[in-house]
Image (cartoon, grey):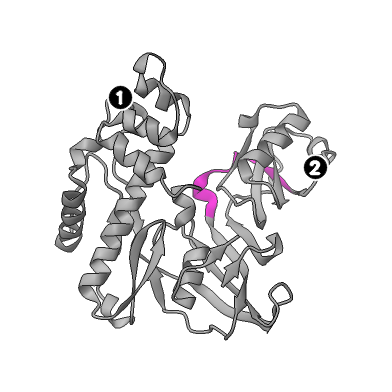
């Protein structure tokens, strides 16, 4: 089973609540439609072509490169025609109107998806009412080891973290070497995400007599065998930080078990060497409902001879992974190309 064999196989449309069309607006709002570009690189190129700072363009979320995506961006400029004159391969900009402020993450109300699943032999039409809100492999990097680097940072093993990243440290200053990557926050949050996944999987294994396992970046994660076993399930789980508190005893037990195996405690997350990483513990929804799920097509797969393809559509809240929905649907891991 495969997804993303073509960018056209993975369509994403952002649901954004920012109001446009203001007569007093000072920011131009556009729909950015793209493929073969991730959001950061697309925005960087647009800013370069216009002759403004990258920070003068804002957005509400990041979108993948290997997909066709639509999202709202705002540009700190009053003449929208300057932006529309920009011509970049595989990027389209549609003027929406003027906005009174820049786009913010909170404006993102989720995403609509249309995904083609290829190289299958039967139709998949039954999706559970709720699925685990796991972080998927994109969170853990191309080498599936971002969380391993984060673990070493939390354990103050900065030399080992540099070794894993294959970076050299001048005068053995490993902390400075990690800071210079500009991505230390990614490793830190990836480790938090790993612990969230493991704790959520622990709870599912404990509450559900029947479950399936899917390998995600080396993690064997459990998916409930029925909806009944997750009735009364904790609504949210914290992402572990130094101030983590557990109101639900089940969640406390899960995290204590995982942290014991990791040989760490929440206080270890207060990294004085990286003060920018010290923040209060956010929470993440444990289970999500997939809105509007529908099979939109089932036919011969022109890219994989003798096999079938299926198109599904659905909507998800911000921060949830469409690839996780497909894995829950088919009950096994995918080849993402």
Query: Where's the C terminus, which quadrant?
Result: bottom right
Q: Answer with the quarter of the image where residue 223 lies.
A: bottom left
With respect to residue 82, does 51 lie above or below? above
Q: Position of residue 300 (x, y in %)?
A: 71, 82
With respect to residue 15, does 171 lie above or below? above
Residue annotated with mark 1: 273
Residue annotated with mark 2: 88
Residue 305 lies left or right of residue 2; in this view the side is: right
Residue 106 at least partly seen: yes
**For marks 1 and 2 on the same chain, the one whose residue lies earlier in the sequence:** 2
Element at label 2: loop
The structure residue drawn at horizontal position 48% and vertical position 76%, both measured from the top left corner, is 329
The structure residue drawn at horizontal position 56% and vertical position 47%, both measured from the top left corner, is 60
Q: Which residues are magenta?
A: 96-108
Q: Who is closer to the viewer here, 207 or 317? A: 207
Q: Position of residue 115 (x, y in %)?
A: 62, 69
Element at label 1: loop
Q: Position of residue 24 (x, y in %)?
A: 68, 38
Label 2: how many Cα within 10 Å (few below 14, some 14–19, many 20+): few
Q: Who is closer to the viewer here, 110 or 214? A: 214
Q: Residue furthest top?
A: 171
The structure residue drawn at horizontal position 60% and vertical position 52%, both measured from the top left corner, is 64
Residue 279 at least partly seen: no
Distance Cα–Cα, label 1 vs label 2: 41 Å
Q: Is residue 260 magenta?
A: no
Q: Is residue 100 magenta?
A: yes
- Count numbered badges in the picture: 2
């Amino acid at each position: 089973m495969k997804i993303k064999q073509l960018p056209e196989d993975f369509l994403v449309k952002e649901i954004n609540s920012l109001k446009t069309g203001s007569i007093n607006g000072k920011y131009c709002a556009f729909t950015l439609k793209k493929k073969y570009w991730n959001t950061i690189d697309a925005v960087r190129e647009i800013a370069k072509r216009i002759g403004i700072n990258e920070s003068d363009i804002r957005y509400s979320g990041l979108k993948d490169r290997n997909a066709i995506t639509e999202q709202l961006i705002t540009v700190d400029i009053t003449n929208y025609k300057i932006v529309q004159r920009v011509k970049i391969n595989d990027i389209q900009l549609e003027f929406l109107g003027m906005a009174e402020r820049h786009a913010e993450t909170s404006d993102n109300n989720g995403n609509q998806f249309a995904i083609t699943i290829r190289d299958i032999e039967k139709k998949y039409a039954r999706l559970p009412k709720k699925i685990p809100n796991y972080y998927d492999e994109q969170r853990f990097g191309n080498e599936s080891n971002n969380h391993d680097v984060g673990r070493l940072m939390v354990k103050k093993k900065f030399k080992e973290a540099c070794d894993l990243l294959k970076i050299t440290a001048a005068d053995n200053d490993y902390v400075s070497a990690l800071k210079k990557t500009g991505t230390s926050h990614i490793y830190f949050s990836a480790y938090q995400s790993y612990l969230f996944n493991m704790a959520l999987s622990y709870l599912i294994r404990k509450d559900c007599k029947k479950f399936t396992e899917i390998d995600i970046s080396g993690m064997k994660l459990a998916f409930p065998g029925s909806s009944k076993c997750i009735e009364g399930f904790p609504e949210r789980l914290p992402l572990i930080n130094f101030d983590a508190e557990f109101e639900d005893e089940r969640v406390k037990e899960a995290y204590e078990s995982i942290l014991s195996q990791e040989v760490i405690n929440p206080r270890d997350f207060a990294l004085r060497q990286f003060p920018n990483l010290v923040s209060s513990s956010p929470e993440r929804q444990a289970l999500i409902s997939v809105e509007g799920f529908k099979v939109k097509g089932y036919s011969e797969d022109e890219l994989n001879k003798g096999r079938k393809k299926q198109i599904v559509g659905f909507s998800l809240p911000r921060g949830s992974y469409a690839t996780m929905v497909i894995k829950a649907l088919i009950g096994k891991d995918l080849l993402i190309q």
